[in-house]
Image: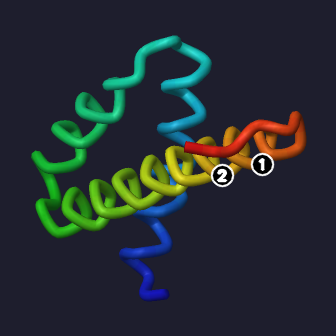
Amino acid sequence: MSFIEDLADDLARDTLAACDELGDDRFYEQVSKSVGVLSPTLQEAFMTSIRMRLAERRGRRALEEALSAFRAGKRPE
């Protein structure tokens, strides 16, 4: 990854952890606005990392639910 992608991904990871701790699933929007004031380039890389990480979470949840249902003898939807 490039320097900017590394920075953005580190910030995204930390921000999503903060979202979980704060119980605010949209907190990353505040961070994005703050970053965008000084660097729209970093903001876009940050939002890309946020979207990718959120998509991975959703996919992992679906996978775990399907496996759990299968292991319980149910057919996944």
Q: How is the image coloured?
A: rainbow
State which quadrant residue 10 falls in. Answer: bottom right
State which quadrant residue 46 falls in. Answer: bottom left
Within 10 angstroms of label 2, few (less than 14), some, or many (20 or more) residues? few
Residue at 52%, 13% in the rendered image: 22
Image coordinates for residue 19, horizontal then vertical, percent = 49, 25
Badge 2 vs badge 1, beta-carbon distance below 8 Å:
yes
Residue tagged 2: 63
Say whether residue 57 is left or right of residue 43.
right
Spatial CA span between label 2 and label 1 = 6 Å
Q: Quadrant of the C terminus?
A: top right
Q: Relative to residue 13, is residue 19 depicted above or below?
A: above
Q: Count every numbered label the image shows and give the total.
A: 2
Residue tagged 1: 67
**Residue type, label 2:** Leu
Q: Relative to residue 43, is residue 23 depicted above or below?
A: above
Secondary structure beneath label 2: helix
Secondary structure beneath label 1: helix
Image coordinates for residue 29, horizontal then vertical, percent = 24, 33
Image coordinates for residue 42, horizontal then vertical, percent = 25, 64
User: Considering depth in this image, is 10 or 56 the residue closer to the camera?
Assistant: 56
State which quadrant residue 32 falls in. Answer: top left
Image coordinates for residue 51, horizontal then vertical, percent = 34, 54
